[in-house]
Amino acid sequence: MLLSEQEQFLSYNGEVLIFQLSHPKHVEGVADKTVDLCVRRMTFNRDTKLFVQKSSGAFSVHGSPLKMEIICCSCTTDSRTGIILPCILMKKRKRNNVVKYLLLLLHSSNQFEQSFQFKLDYELKEDINLFGGPSVLWRHASKLFYISASTCTVLSAPVQLSSVVWTGEIEEEGPVVLGIRTACLTESEAEAEFSTSDRAIWGSELFGYAVRAQKMLPGTCFMPHAYGRVVSSVCVCKSETLRKQLRTSLVAITHKNQLIWFQDGLPRGVCELPYEDPYSVKAAVTSSSDVLFIVSFASGNVCAVQKRGSLQVASKWQDVKCVLVDDFIGSGSEQLLLLFRDDSSAEVLSTFTITDLGAVSYASGKNYKHNVAAAEGLQENGLLTVQALQTRLQAGCTAVRELQYHLGLKKRVILQSCKALNDLVEGRTHVLPTAKEEGLAPLWDEVENPPSPPLGQETPVAQQAPERLVESLWQRVVGDSLVVGVQLAEAFHLSLSGASLSLVLDQDSSLAAPVIKCRNKVTKLDRACSALPLSPCHIEPPAKKMKLDLCGNRNLKKEFPQGCSGAGLAAGRAVTAVTSLSPLLAFHRVCCAVLLHAKRKAPHGDSLQESKEISVFCGKIALSLEDISNGKHSVKLLRDNGYCTGSMEDVLAVLAVSARFSFQVVSAACTLTPIASWLLGDMECTPLKECTDKLFCHKAGNVYGTILSWTLKNPLEGVLTLFCRNLTVLFQCLHSLRRVLPASCDVKLLRSGSKDALSEQLALALEKEMLTSRSAFFSVLTSGSSFFSKESKAESTSPWGDESDEEISAAAVASLLESKEGVEQFRKKLQSERDKSELSMAQTMTAALYQEMTWKTAEAQLSSDMVVWRLSKA
């Protein structure tokens, strides 16, 4: 096998790939019709300091050896897998001036794969580049052409250019081509007569073209316009898009033998190159995190420019056949591989140099025996490094084990606390585990049998029988929610506050979290004052007391009748807890203890005693999948005789899982009679028999089960309250309502808020009421003091002069009483003080000031009354 002179070198994952074309020896009378494309994988051996062959492969191409040629090779991305593979472009000449091109991919098994082929009526000679896809891009007749594996068709870009200086990938833009073209001047610039130097500068410009997006990129993102004429090659080091603006960092070589560094389109540094005619530049990141720019020249020379604050030439070489950048020694950083021309040796990679201009330096034909001691020292340092890393790894594992132990300890403490809570509320004696059982060291001697309390001493509260605060305990299943309710005894309706429920799994459960997460709600069980929920008898909410009566005396009993206010009717309170049902059904059968938490208010007349927190065991509930399937705990609300029948527990369960929305409906042109017809007709609502002020919707669809309440404040204004499962149901109800209401009606959402928010509003309202009262008091004083000051100035004839308003000492009084004149002066002083005191007690103010002060006070008091009423309804 005879090797041709064609050789192409490519670095790939630290290996050197050598591509060569070969053909069999010529035999007379036998036509040679095949050519082999051979590849050899060479790796650097750090022991022998030489390149050795790792593997090889071949690909046979049918055709004449004299008409085959390797155009170029590069590492590109295979769009099918996203893996970077070596890519080779070959040329095969045919008759009639037709040139066929083959694009091959090399896999790790040294198998070649033909990606695609295409034919042209001319040869590729100018600016040929390979990029991801794989794709081929070239320039011909000042036009840009490209073809990819996905299209397999030669496409032309709508741009005119004189040269291509860089091809590569840019974030969010894909493959981008940087080229030089004739500048696009405006009409005024085109008509202007440029000088020779100006025309050389402004006649050409750099531009970018995104191949896939088929759009132009402004050249000013890369460098100023004036540099487009002299640039011959570019290496883009970094590109990113920030706030829709392209940010770049690149270096460019010019025809003036310069290397210029550009940052965001502006020049940041320049370096004079040691040789002429530079034609390519590439970057390398070395072990010291320094960036080297390797510049190749047409004469076969190479130089490395280092960027340390400023650009400077770090090293240069001559008679270089090829320069590659990769991690050839496996150190984790890049090095330069310089292949030199050597006519005396026929071996490939016989003369080379590997360097990073730092600690790494290997050269062919060099004796490394004297460096054995240094190598042993490096090996010893490597061993010490590995030992240090092992120590850090062991310390990290120890820290992880300690963290796991602490987490397990916390879990056991939480479980024991829940067990102790159950025993406390059920009246059992909780036995703490010993320190040995918990794996802890006791701080003092443990006593196995604690002594019983002496005679006459009271039993602890946990062992006393709890008071009967709870009338009933019930549970319901509504959709995917479990509702547990407790009805409080009427005797403790007013003495408890801040009530809530906790659901604790039974001790037999193996759940890691014994306390079930749930949301609580307190509902007042006020009976409706009328059996006709749509009657307009509901007027303004009754206030606590009438703060101001400007129109005369009114009879409060006539204004708010006893039968419609709700006072004196049977009332109670129910506490509900809602939790998700699905996690509980995973255990098939669950038993939970229900605990009531509340604050007992101090009895009347004992305001010094603080509220006492109590926890009461209400009982246990059992839940199984069979009971739910049989509908044992389902809500049963049925239509019967114009009413919706069902237990009060069913109503409370539906209210607990529903969200409450209140809307103020105001009509300026007509009465709100259509709303009653809408509720009874379109929505198919019936009053709840247990709570007649609320209506249950029986309409089929999503709105079924919605509870509504309609209250008329006057014929033109009312409040509609909806209890919906979700927002979709709410929007459907409002959509149906708007169709029956006149266009002049206004529907406004009332944000009553939660109890915490209303409590904060009440505090602010009371504070405003106090500030208003204080401001009115100071207004009275200010008005009186100004009046008093005028009178005092008119009648100020005190014989004491400037000291009339000052306090007189006992010695001065004694001296006055010694003479008759002094006694007379003293009498006049006392009379003057008496007159001033009577005048201050009989102050007057204007009617306008009094009316303004009275209205402000009344407005603040009524505002606080309204917040109190809203809080009572929450």
Image (spheres, rainbow, N blue to C red):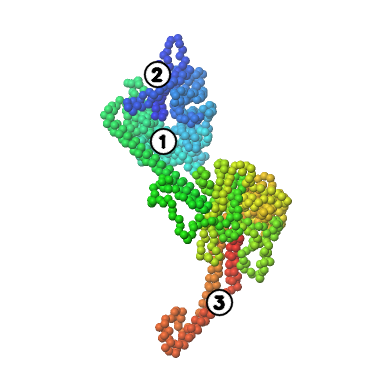
Quick one: 405 or 747, which is closer to the camera? 405
Residue 870 at what x, y percent from top left?
Answer: 60, 59
Give the class, few, some or many, for how many residues have Cα within 10 Å of label 3's Cα (few <14, many ≥20).
Answer: some
Q: Which mark is residue 298?
A: none
Circle 3: residue type: Gln
Mark 2 vs 3, N-terminal side: 2
Circle 1: residue type: Ala
Give the class, few, some or many, for how many residues have Cα within 10 Å of label 2's Cα (few <14, many ≥20).
Answer: few
Residue 473 at what x, y percent from top left?
Answer: 59, 52
Front label number (2 vs 3): 3
The residue that disc 2 covers is: 3
For image coordinates 67% across by 57% down, the residue present is 528
Q: Which mark is residue 843?
A: 3
* Residue 394 as seen in the image, left or right of residue 456: left
Quick one: 3 or 53, which is closer to the camera? 53
At numbered mark 1, what does the secondary structure look like: helix, strand or loop?
A: strand
For image coordinates 53% across by 70% down, the residue present is 778
Q: Are discs 2 and 3 less than 8 Å apart at CB?
A: no
Q: Which mark is residue 252?
A: 1
For image coordinates 54% across by 66% down, the residue present is 605
At numbered mark 3, what does the secondary structure look like: helix, strand or loop?
A: loop
Circle 2: residue type: Leu
Can you name the residue that lies furthest to the right here? 641
Front label number (3 vs 1): 3
